[in-house]
């Protein structure tokens, strides 16, 4: 199982949108996918049409002393092969509870161990902070995707995030890879958006995904219907872009395994 954390401490840069739609695109392509909502805001849960205030169990339960196995909190979604470990506001208490626990950085990794062989991909949506929750998500992951909103302050905060990823690699998870920076909210008709795109590519090179996600009204509307874009507007630009992203990653993962394709390999090395 490839476990991919969608992380950036910056709010509103498209983490949840990416988690929901990348996962859905993979499931549509026949992969078995688990989405872990690891944000107390519960947006991924809602984005998949689940009322986060009416849940018997959430991912939070897997951290309690009663030790609920993760398989007990996972629910089906309307999309075949796409399962969800939901969350809600209760998860916000975990930050403090974990703080005093021995091996606190590995708690999520341990809780997900039971489903390692059940899925092709596990996608973890992180909260907008560099908290212990986000640290747990990154430690539990094989890869990280960093959505970055194409605006004037795009680079701000990225250094800290990349620094944190390096620390995690060094201390907790040597095999962790930064799969790529995903440019979101692209407006191809503005000079600023084009400038930021080229600056990011100059600066980060291969680390920036070829595919970018444009700002579209359909992507903004889909969560209100509780549907991923591939269901809400299957022929829209957003649906196509998230399908391409899913394909781009699947290809890079397969090529890296076979030792092919230098460009893609260097991105995920
Ligand atoms: N490409 C896009 N075009 C238009 N709207 C978008 C796009 N991507 C995301 N949005 C909308 O922008 C808002 C923020 O996106 P999203 O929730 O994915 O960000 P986030 O990084 O998860 O936020 P947070 O940091 O609060 O968790 C949402 O209302 C979402 O529907
Ligand atoms: Mg979010």
Image (spheres, rainbow, N blue to C red):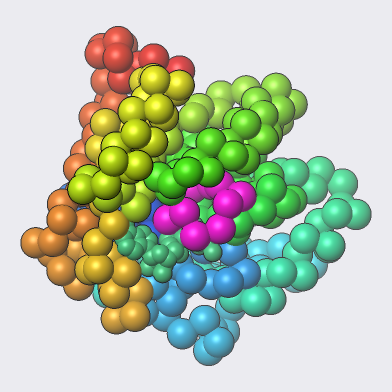
Q: Is residue 150 above or below residue 36?
A: above
Q: Which residue is farthest right?
A: 100
| Residue 84, image quadrant | bottom left
Rendered-image quadrant of the C terminus:
top left
The residue sitting at 56% across, 47% down in the picture is: 8
Which quarter is ligand 1 in? bottom left
Number of marks: 0
Q: Residue 201 at x, y = what percent?
A: 37, 25
Q: Is residue 95 above or below residue 116?
A: below
Task: Say which quarter of the image contains residue 48.
Answer: bottom left
Most extreme residue toward the front is 191
Q: Position of residue 262 (x, y in %)?
A: 30, 10
Residue 99 appears left or right of 124: right
Horizontally, residue 36 falls left or right of residue 118, namely right
Q: Which residue is at a point 49% across and 30% down the rendered structure image?
A: 178
Q: Which residues are magenta?
A: 2-16
Q: Say whether residue 189 is left or right of residue 166.
A: left
Q: Is residue 33 magenta?
A: no
Q: Is any atom of residue 231 visible in this view?
A: no
Q: Is residue 13 magenta?
A: yes
Residue at the (44%, 46%) spot, across then down: 151
Residue 184 in percent (x, y) is at: 36, 48
Q: Is residue 40 visible?
A: yes
- In this view, 62 is above or below 54: above
Q: Nearer the viewer, residue 205 or 139?
A: 205
Question: Depth check: 241 or 117 in front?
Answer: 241
Residue 83 higher or lower than 27, as above or below: below
**In the depicted view, which residue is nearer to us: 218 or 89?**
218
Q: Residue at x 42, y 35 (%)?
A: 181
List x then y, in percent, for residue 21: 31, 58
């Amino acid at each position: 199982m490839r476990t991919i954390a969608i992380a950036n401490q910056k709010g509103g840069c498209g983490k949840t949108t990416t988690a929901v739609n990348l996962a859905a695109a993979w499931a549509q392509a026949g992969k078995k996918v688990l989405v872990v909502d690891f944000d107390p805001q519960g947006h991924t849960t809602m984005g998949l049409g689940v009322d986060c205030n009416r849940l018997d169990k959430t991912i939070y339960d897997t951290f309690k002393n009663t030790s609920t196995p993760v398989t007990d909190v996972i629910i089906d979604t309307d999309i075949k092969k796409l399962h969800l470990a939901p969350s809600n506001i209760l998860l916000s208490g975990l930050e403090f509870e974990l703080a005093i626990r021995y091996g606190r950085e590995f708690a999520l990794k341990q809780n997900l161990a039971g489903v390692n062989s059940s899925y092709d991909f596990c996608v973890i949506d992180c909260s907008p902070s560099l908290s212990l929750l986000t640290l747990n998500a990154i430690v539990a992951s094989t890869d990280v995707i960093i959505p970055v909103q194409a605006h004037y302050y795009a680079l701000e905060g990225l250094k800290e995030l990349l620094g944190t990823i390096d620390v995690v690699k060094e201390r907790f998870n040597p095999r962790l890879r930064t799969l790529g920076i995903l440019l979101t909210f692209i407006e191809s008709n503005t000079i600023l958006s084009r400038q930021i795109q080229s600056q990011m590519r100059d600066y980060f090179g291969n680390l920036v995904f070829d595919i970018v996600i444009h700002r579209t009204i359909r992507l903004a509307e889909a969560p209100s219907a509780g549907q991923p874009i591939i269901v809400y507007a299957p022929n829209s630009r957003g649906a196509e872009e998230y399908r391409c992203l899913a394909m781009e990653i699947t290809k890079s993962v397969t090529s890296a395994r076979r030792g092919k394709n230098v460009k893609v390999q260097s991105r995920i090395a």
